[in-house]
Amino acid sequence: MRLTSLSVLISVTAFAGCAEAVANEALELEVSAGVSTLLIDRGESLATTNNELGLTISRKTSVGDVYASLYRITPLGGDARAFDEEVDYTIGFRGAFADVEYDLSANYLTFPGSAEETSLEIATEFAWNHKLNPGFATFV
């Protein structure tokens, strides 16, 4: 539990320090932190209780937004050792054309301190600006 607390403290400090680095008006910064319970990702339970931290830096262009993200999931609680910590690095592009919003990204998934292999995931998402808000997402 002590290593997990230290890991969370280091992540929060790093995220807070990034705000000064992106004070430029052309860049946007989004920082998020939360605790989730019973987080299930693609049918797999990631832990009973998790600390989730996220950092996204984006820049608007004439055709859409370019962004880079860091997302960290740290298991908490008595059963935390049974689950892997996960740190994901993402670069992507999102925009809109007519009534369709799209997001294309490459996600590098890592599992520090675990024998779990890293992976590269290519993702696409399309959402139609319609009353029912239909969407379509793929992950390769």
Image (cartoon, rainbow, N blue to C red):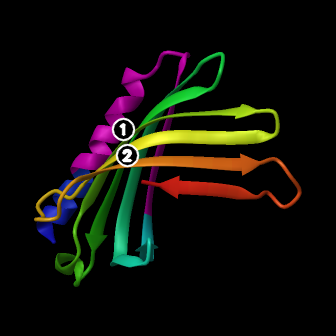
For marks 2 and 1, give the CA distance.
23 Å
Using a 10 Å C-alpha cutoff, classify the residue at mark 1 as few (fewer than 14 neighbours), some (14 to 19) or many (20 or more): few
Where is residue 35 shown, x and y percent of the image? 42, 67
Residue 14 painted magenta: yes
Q: Which residue is drawn at 60% across and 49% down?
A: 125
Q: Which residue is disc 2 drawn over?
A: 107
Where is residue 33? Give x, y as percent: 43, 54
**Amino acid type of the residue tagged 2 in the rendering:** Asn
Q: x and y percent of residue 73 in the render?
A: 33, 61
Which quarter of the picture shows residue 81?
A: bottom left
Q: How packed is label 2: few (under 14 Cα within 10 Å), some, or many (20 or more)?
A: some
| Magenta part of the chain | 10-34
Is the N terminus in the top left, top right, bottom left or bottom right quadrant?
Answer: bottom left
Residue 20 placement, left or right of 58: left
Location of residue 44 with respect to 112 vertically, above or below: below
Residue located at (39% from left, 60% from top)? 52
Q: Is residue 72 above or below residue 47?
A: above
Instruction: Tell me what residue is drawn at x 41 percent, y 30 percent.
Output: 19
Rendering quarter of residue 63: top right
- Amino acid type of the residue that numbered disc 1 sits on in the rendered structure: Ala
